[in-house]
Amino acid sequence: MKVIQEVEPTCFEQAVKNPKWDNAMDEEMAALDANATWELVVLPEDKKAIGYKWVYKVKHNADGSVSKYKARLVAKGYAQTYGIDYEETYSPVAKMTTVRAIIAMATTKGWSLHQMDVKNVFLHGDLQEEVYMEQPPGYVDQTHPNLVCRLKKTLYGLKQAPRV
Amino acid sequence: MKKTNHGIVVIVIYFDDLIITGDSDVDISYLKKLLKQKFEMKDLGELRYFLGIEVIQSPKGIWLLQRQYALNKLSEYGMTSCKPISIPLEQNVKLSVDEGELVEDTTMYRCIVRSLFYMTITRPDLSYVVRVVS
């Protein structure tokens, strides 16, 4: 039984030195690319670009073994302004009591329970509002370093994210 | 929740995690197929681990446990070498705002309270402890 947890990097500078985390970031960028999450544009004068942050997490299996090194690019959604960058927010989250009630029902009726999850859930939603983000560190377009990312799909951290 | 010709199918959605259950396995497989066509999804088979809760399904019933969650929290708070005891609280403990020593790391204290509260899902007997410390 492994109880000592691996240290998760807190910033890009730390993570980039470790091939495991570097790989994880490449994977995330490939997924964002494949989804056409953003396009590079010139930032309009009356808009401002929000920041980003890399978040690193070691994923564990139920027995405590490491299942995956996960890097996730998140937008600093708290820099968005209500009414300008976003309007309503909503997230489909079941209450724990509901979950327990369903499980109880399955028990009494003898139903089997199944589980699924969505890969990169937020990337399925198209973004209505105009949101600009700076280019992520380490992955800045060499020929156009001054352009910003105009987001076309939602990204983790955005106010719009939980609505999808 | 949806009724079909065969019976009923229930879906619980927590963000990107789904629990699917119902009385017809045919409908469940069909629903999974539909979902996979529409979204990029991973079929995790039988429900085993959901929001930090381990689920064990057996003919006798369903077990819910948060063993791994509790172990993770113990290591997070540096308490892996602590001994388990049957009564998790001293008798007649009174916490006071203005008497005694102050808690040093208030953020960590709140995190622990939160973790304890989360564990009341499978251990309702912890509710009393949570009430005392929060």
Image: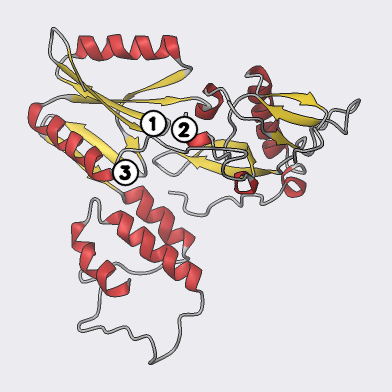
Q: Nearer the viewer, residue A48 or A63?
A: A48
Residue B85 in view: no
Q: Residue B40 at x, y = what percent?
A: 48, 17
Please determine if labels 3 and 1 lie on a single subunit.
Answer: yes
Quarter of the image for the N terminus of chain B: give it.
top left
Residue A39 in view: yes
Q: Residue A35 at x, y = what percent?
A: 62, 19
Above or below residue B86? Residue A151 is above
Label 1 belongs to which residue?
Answer: B17
What's under tag 2, amino acid-wise? Arg
Say whether disc 3 or disc 1 marks the residue closer to the N-terminus.
Answer: 1
Q: Which of B87 and A98 is in front in this view?
A: A98
What's under tag 1, amino acid-wise? Asp
Dot 3 falls on which chain? B
Dot 2 falls on which chain? A
| Nearer mark to the viewer, of 2 and 1 | 2
The disc label shown at residue B53, or none: 3
Q: Residue B93 at x, y = what percent?
A: 25, 83
What's the image's color scheme? secondary structure
To which quarter of the image does residue B96 belong? Answer: bottom left
Label 2 belongs to which residue?
Answer: A163
Q: Do the residues labelled 3 and 2 touch (CB within 8 Å)?
A: no
> What SS does tag 3 mark?
strand
Q: Residue A91 at x, y = what percent?
A: 42, 37
